[in-house]
Image (tube, rainbow, N blue to C red):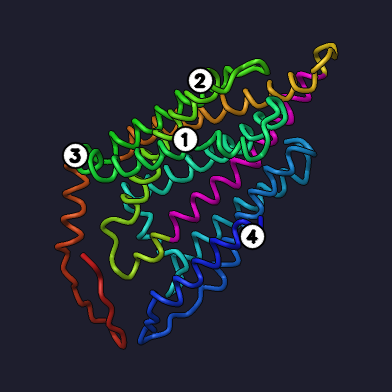
């Protein structure tokens, strides 16, 4: 953890040197009710999924936590519809293309965090890689993410639009995790892990970068900060839920496998690997579902261009009411 202090220190110095402070002329009010509802709702959902690992899906704690979390998030949406200065203006997510981009980030985060966590377990606990070697083993995926994200945003996204690019990325992620779900305790890194990492790197670059681009494109200047923050939030929420769900799946499958087979030498590693493989398969199915949604819900390139053109050329109509004046973006 101390390694991260160096990067944080560099960020602090860069912020002090290069960032300029600009104070708004009117100080906005903080949506305290919306903040509390969103935080408690997300906590309830994540805690419920995490609690299922130890108490089971049918336990009262798990069910009450999940139900309470969903209810609080519904209440959050209702509040955001009525408050004057909402924490999350719903117009940001009401746009079809932008809303699907946020969902794509969450779906990718859900599947991606499961890959990082359980593949690390596999490499260190089953293949006996050192922590440093395990980190180096992920470098091919990171390199592919860098190449794919730049290529997607600069070349393929302007040419084909988000529907084709992000759907292709989801399908590639499905193939990569599906390949990884074939691993066993005797699989080699070169033949059993590396091809999946390459596919996952290409997939993440095709999903995350275009989704972030699409999620923040065409928003009104007053909503740009909210849109950018929501992208990061969706990735973290997807990762939190994904880690909780996939941990529950891994624990359940490993326990079930251990209970149904006679113990032999190396049995713990075999049972754990079976659980990891099931998690990778579940993550692959998440990507498959994301691919279907992306193909169905993302607008075509021509439709998206028309939508953005209408936003950029929109007029502002002033409507006068007794004692109030408000503006509506057309």
Tag nearer the camera, 4 or 3: 3
Distance from Cα at disc 2 to Cα at disc 1:
15 Å
Which quadrant is the N terminus positioned in? bottom right
Question: How would you rate the neighbour count of disc 1 (Cα within 10 Å): few for under 14, some for 14-19, many for 20 or more?
Answer: many
What stretch of residues is rendered in magenta? Answer: 229-258
Q: Which of the two labelled residues, at mark 2 and mark 4, occupies the earlier sequence position?
A: 4
Give the residue at mark 3.
159
Distance from Cα at disc 4 to Cα at disc 1:
35 Å
Q: Residue at x 47, y 80 (%)?
A: 29
Dominant SS in magenta:
helix
Which circle marks residue 77 in the picture? none
Q: Which of the two labelled residues, at mark 2 and mark 1, occupies the earlier sequence position?
A: 1
Location of residue 133 (image quadrant)? top right
Give the residue at mark 2.
179
Distance from Cα at disc 2 to Cα at disc 4:
37 Å
Give the residue at mark 1.
141
Nearest the camera: 141 or 310?
A: 141
Compared with 113, 212 (above or below) is: below
Give coordinates of residue 98: x percent, y percent: 34, 50
Give coordinates of residue 115: x percent, y percent: 57, 34
Q: Which of the two labelled residues, at mark 3 and mark 1, occupies the earlier sequence position?
A: 1
Q: Are marks 4 and 3 in contact (CB under 8 Å)?
A: no
């Amino acid at each position: 953890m101390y390694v991260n202090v160096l990067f944080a220190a560099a960020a602090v110095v860069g912020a002090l040197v290069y960032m300029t402070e600009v104070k708004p002329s009117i100080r906005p009010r903080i949506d305290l009710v919306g903040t509390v509802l969103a935080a408690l709702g997300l906590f309830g959902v994540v805690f419920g999924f995490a609690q299922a690992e130890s108490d089971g899906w049918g336990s009262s704690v798990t069910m009450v936590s999940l139900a309470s979390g969903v209810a609080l998030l519904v209440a959050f949406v209702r509040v955001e519809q009525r408050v004057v200065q909402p924490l999350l203006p719903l117009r940001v997510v009401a746009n079809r293309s932008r809303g699907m981009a946020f969902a794509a980030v969450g779906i990718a985060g859900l599947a991606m965090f499961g890959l990082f966590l359980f593949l690390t377990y596999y490499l260190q606990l089953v293949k006996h890689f050192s922590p440093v070697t395990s980190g180096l083993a992920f470098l091919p995926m990171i390199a592919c993410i860098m190449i794919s994200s730049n290529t997607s945003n600069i070349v393929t996204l302007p040419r084909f639009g988000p529907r084709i690019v992000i759907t292709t990325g989801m399908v590639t992620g499905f193939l990569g995790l599906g390949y990884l779900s074939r691993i066993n305790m005797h699989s080699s890194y070169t033949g059993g892990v590396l091809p999946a990492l390459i596919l996952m790197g290409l997939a993440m670059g095709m999903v995350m970068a275009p989704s972030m681009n699409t999620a923040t494109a065409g928003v009104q200047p007053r909503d740009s900060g909210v849109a950018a923050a929501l992208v990061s939030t969706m990735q973290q929420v997807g990762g939190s839920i994904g880690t909780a769900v996939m941990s529950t799946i891994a624990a359940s499958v490993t326990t079930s496998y251990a209970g149904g087979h006679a113990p032999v030498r190396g049995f713990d590693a075999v049972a754990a690997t079976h659980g990891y493989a099931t998690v990778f398969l579940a993550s692959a199915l998440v990507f498959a579902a994301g691919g279907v949604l992306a193909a169905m819900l993302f607008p075509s390139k021509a439709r998206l261009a028309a939508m953005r053109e209408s936003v950029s050329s929109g007029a502002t109509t002033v409507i006068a009411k007794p004692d109030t004046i408000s503006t509506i973006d057309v």
